């Protein structure tokens, strides 16, 4: 420590709110360079390398190969997939001296897809799985809690390539297992939740959320193991019914309409295909808007109503009335992610759903390629839209109305709500990117088939932040051994040169046995300051070589439990290692 590039701070940084963030700065792991942009100091680098090591090991265990793509990227591939514009303000865009557009990569589906397209052409080349650990750039609207939400951060991103969906499923399952191992080793409480596919497009997707009350994600779970990000509470549509404007209109309902009245209207006018009758929340989550395509095909757009709770007549009306939607003229629905997916939003969203439908349809209506039939009580589609409450610019719908105690989507459980921090995200992308960029291979019959992809991310720097949030006390950080910057922190608490000689010896022997050490050999720093620094830095074992040496003992302290014991100096190394 006499030479370590480190200056611990006694005061909390002014911009920090969460304990882990404060301590990472105070203990000299990271330093803020600009909002959402952090420098990693030597102690931080040690922890980061260990987290990266765990992630790398588990990636290699499932046969993924490490590569590194550039972070500075050309615009064209991102134009081809629409993400140059879709990403909006979150994308860092820049120009080179020739005025060509570049971007700083927020995620790398396009580049991986193109590399595989360049190098591979046959089904025999697949399956393939690649990963990288690399800086990502996103101009986050609200960088937060230091490295938890940075504008520059390290992500482990991986991509799988397969000829068919069976292959993709296998790759996905492999990554899921690898992620379980990674997050078990990192040692924080997490849940695996069904996730919204957001701006990525595609189908199956799950998130690994660290359970944390300061998290920005809200998830629900029930007593039967169901868990989902509230953004993704979608009910499977087993037997969709078509509801046209009026069929369950407010006219069908008595003065104080409840969900029951809509159930009755449905049972009267729209018997279920499977012969069961509509009941409760289960019923209402199956109200469907049909999109009519020009070629005569139809696509379901789910709307639902909140659980079994009373709603006022006006709300019921606005939810049910815009119930038939027609579109024509070969509109490219892929441009509207939520439409392309065939549904709008969570089954229990309530009011915001009709707003969201309106939001998503507005562009279609404005350009004359769709119109909305169905009306509210004034014969018009008038709705109260609030940006940020009902929808966001990327089409994400806010789950403003999901409540503790709601029925879970299958109707068999009761939901509880909790907060989490997204640590990992696994995703069956399907052919979306491969199609946009023309990644095809010859199959066994010599026919060209589009490759199907998965993408899999881990927030590596965010993981360091989450471990720090979960492992600290009044005195400082308390690292789990597997990712601590060292195993043992040796403090010389004496001016006596014999103490330094003994401590040198202990350090050398520990290092020889592969035990990593931090050695506080600072000659002019008081024992009190050294102890404080040791607690703040948070290495699991603290060894004090000081007064006890006169009686032939040194002290070993467990940082987490605070338990101390004295051991004979001759056995010290065996005891510590
Ligand atoms: P979030 O919902 O927290 O914004 P995301 O869904 O945008 O995350 P992905 O695109 O799924 O993130 O990226 C994969 C992983 O990268 C995330 O699961 C998360 O752990 C990490 N990550 C994403 N954004 C950031 C960020 N700004 N800072 C640190 N880590 C991040
Ligand atoms: Mg994000
Ligand atoms: Mg997310
Ligand atoms: Mg995500």
Image (spheres, rainbow, N blue to C red):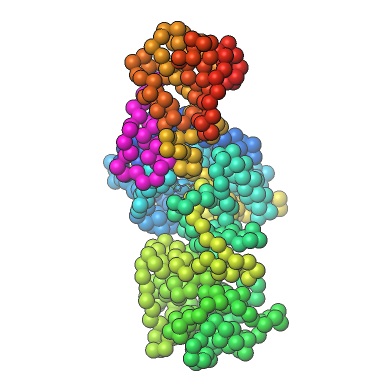
Q: Looking at this view, is 454 or 155 the one in front?
A: 155
Left or right for 161, reference 11? right
Q: Quadrant of the N terminus?
A: top left
On the image, the x and y values in percent for residue 383 come to 38, 78
Q: Which residues are magenta?
A: 1-28
- In which quadrant is the C terminus drawn? top right
Q: Position of residue 497 (x, y in %)?
A: 41, 7
Residue 515 in view:
no
Q: Residue at coordinates 65% horizontally, 72% vertically from top-left?
A: 238
Q: Position of residue 178 (x, y in %)?
A: 62, 43
For the point 57% across and 17% down, the residue is: 567
**In the rendered picture of this protein, how many numbered marks are placed on residues?**
0
Q: Position of residue 125 (x, y in %)?
A: 64, 42
| Residue 467 on the magenta span | no
Q: Quadrant of residue 2?
A: top left
Q: 465 and 247: which one is in front?
A: 465
In percent of the image, x 43 and y 57: which residue is there? 82
**Residue placed most toward the observer, 57 or 68:** 57
Asked whether residue 451 appears in the rendered view, the answer is: yes
Residue at the farthest front position: 551
Tell me, yes or no, whether the highlighted magenta stretch contains residue 21. yes
């Amino acid at each position: 420590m006499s030479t370590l590039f480190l200056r611990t701070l006694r005061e909390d940084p002014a911009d920090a709110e969460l304990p882990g963030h404060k301590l990472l700065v105070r203990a000299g792991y990271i330093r803020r360079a600009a909002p959402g942009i952090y420098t990693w100091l030597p102690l931080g680098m040690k922890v980061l390398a260990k987290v990266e090591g765990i992630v790398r090991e588990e990636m290699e265990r499932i046969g993924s190969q490490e590569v590194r793509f550039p972070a500075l990227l050309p615009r064209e591939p991102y134009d081809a997939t629409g993400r140059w514009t879709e990403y909006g303000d979150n994308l860092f865009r820049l120009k080179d001296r020739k005025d060509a557009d570049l971007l700083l990569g927020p995620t790398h589906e396009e580049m991986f897809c193109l590399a595989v397209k360049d190098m591979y052409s046959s089904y025999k080349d697949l399956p393939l799985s690649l990963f990288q650990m690399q800086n990502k750039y996103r101009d986050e609207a609200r960088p937060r809690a230091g490295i938890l939400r940075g504008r520059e951060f390290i992500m482990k991103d991986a991509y799988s390539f397969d000829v068919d969906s069976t292959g993709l499923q296998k790759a996905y399952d492999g990554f899921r297992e690898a992620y379980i191992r990674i997050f078990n080793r990192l040692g924080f409480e997490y849940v695996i939740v069904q996730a919204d596919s957001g701006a990525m497009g595609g189908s199956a997707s799950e998130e690994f959320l660290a359970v944390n009350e300061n998290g920005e994600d809200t998830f629900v779970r029930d007593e039967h193991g169901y868990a989902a990000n509230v953004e993704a509470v979608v009910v499977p549509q087993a037997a969709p019914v078509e509801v046209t404007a009026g069929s369950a209109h407010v006219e069908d309902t008595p003065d104080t309409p409840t969900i029951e009245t809509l159930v009755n209207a449905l049972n009267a006018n729209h018997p279920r295909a499977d012969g069961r009758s509509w009941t409760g929340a289960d019923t209402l989550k199956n109200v469907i808007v049909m999109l009519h395509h020009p070629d005569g095909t139809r696509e379901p757009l789910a709307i639902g109503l909140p659980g079994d709770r009373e709603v006022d007549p006006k709300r019921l009306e606005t939810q049910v009335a815009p119930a038939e939607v027609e579109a024509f003229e070969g509109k490219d629905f892929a441009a509207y992610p939520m439409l392309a997916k065939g549904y709008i939003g969570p089954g229990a969203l309530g009011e915001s759903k009709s707003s969201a439908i309106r939001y998503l349809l507005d562009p279609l209506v404005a350009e004359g390629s769709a119109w909305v039939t169905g009306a509210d009580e004034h014969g018009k589609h008038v709705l109260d839209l609030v940006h940020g409450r009902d929808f966001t610019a990327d089409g994400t719908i806010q789950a403003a109305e999901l409540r503790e105690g709601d029925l879970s989507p299958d109707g068999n459980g009761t939901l509880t709500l909790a907060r989490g921090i997204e640590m990992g995200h696994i995703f069956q992308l399907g052919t979306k990117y491969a199609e946009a960029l023309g990644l095809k291979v010859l199959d066994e019959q010599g026919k060209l088939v589009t490759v199907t992809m998965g993408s899999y991310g881990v927030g590596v720097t965010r993981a360091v932040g989450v471990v720090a949030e979960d492992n600290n006390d009044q005195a400082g950080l308390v690292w789990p051994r597997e990712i601590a910057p060292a195993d043992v922190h040796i403090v010389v608490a004496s001016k006596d040169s014999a103490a330094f000689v003994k401590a040198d010896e202990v350090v050398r022997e520990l290092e020889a046995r592969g035990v990593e050490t931090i050695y506080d050999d600072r000659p002019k720093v008081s024992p009190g300051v050294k102890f404080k620094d040791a607690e703040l830095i948070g290495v699991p074992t603290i060894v004090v070589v000081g007064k006890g040496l006169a009686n032939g003992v040194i002290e070993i302290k467990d940082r987490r439990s605070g338990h101390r014991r004295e051991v004979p100096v001759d056995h010290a190394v065996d005891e510590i290692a």
